[in-house]
Image (tube, helix red, strand yellow):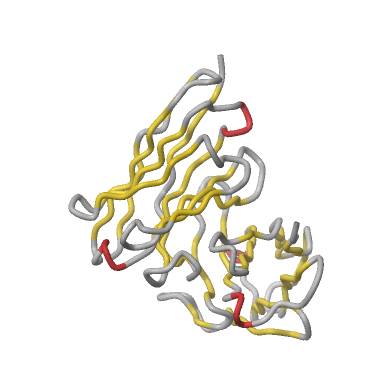
Amino acid sequence: QTVVTQEPSFSVSPGGTVTLTCGLSSGSVSTSYYPSWYQQTPGQAPRTLIYSTNTRSSGVPDRFSGSILGNKAALTITGAQADDESDYYCVLYMGSSLGVFGGGTKLTVL
Amino acid sequence: EVQLVESGGGLVQPGGSLRLSCAASGFTFSSYAMHWVRQAPGKGLEYVSAISSNGGSTYYANSVKGRFTISRDNSKNTLYLQMGSLRAEDMAVYYCARGTCSSTSCPVTSWGQGTLVTVSS
């Protein structure tokens, strides 16, 4: 069974830049998996940040960007702000017609 | 504006059944695949099921296969999830979500606020 991997936690200083990654337990992530990124704060529904590798969802500031870095999908936050402190989830669509979520990354801004 | 409003959650005993609904508005419902994603307390997001825009293709997570049924009524702009033989591990907030195209293999971009399902005796 394919597992989607994410860093369990990450920290960034206010104003800093952080890159979160989304990989596979076996193999490389490609654009054909439509990697997508979601932000979630406790008690709230997920918010779509990036879909299909690098398309920013409506209303998402351009300091959030998506890409493929090496064999992983990546979410980069530049100029981190206090309210970026959230859980971040990636999902990959690998042809089974049901997406697979990563375990999520808890981002701390301090 | 896309709006997705879930309903039907609540307390159910183990082995019981529940039907969730998701009322959609602000877009042409019949043109988009729809998805159910859940989140158990303190856990991450998990895909439950998805259905293509015309209802012709449906998919389920192994954990719910044979117990849950996804369906849609395009005339009523409503998505459903019929849940049966409920277990403690099904307890979660269930989110309705819209994909970016008619196929279930396109990513989700819009989310409802979720409905809580509690399985307990």
Q: Nearer the viewer, residue A96 or A5?
A: A96
Q: Nearer the viewer, residue A107 or B104?
A: B104
| Residue sitting farthest toward the top | B121
How many numbered markers are drawn?
A: 0
- Left or right of A103 in this view: B95: left
Is B88 displayed left or right of A107 in the figure? left
Residue at point 35%, 44% (across, down): B80
In the rendering, at what x and y percent does residue B110 appear? Answer: 41, 63
Decide which of B74, B9 is in the foreground and name it.
B74
Q: Quadrant of the C terminus of chain B?
A: top right
Q: Position of residue B119 (x, y in %)?
A: 54, 24
The percent coordinates of residue A108 (x first, y second) are 72, 61
Residue under the point 56% across and 57% down = A40
Which residue is more in the foreground, B9 or B16?
A: B16
Of all residues, the one furthest to the right in this rendering is: A26
Residue name at image x 62 percent, y 69 percent: A94
The residue under the point 51% across, 40% down is B93
The image shows residue A16, relative to residue B107, as above or below, that is below
Name the spot of residue B77 as percent of width and height, x first: 23, 53
**Above or below for A96 versus A76:** above
Classify residue B10 by image quadrant: top left
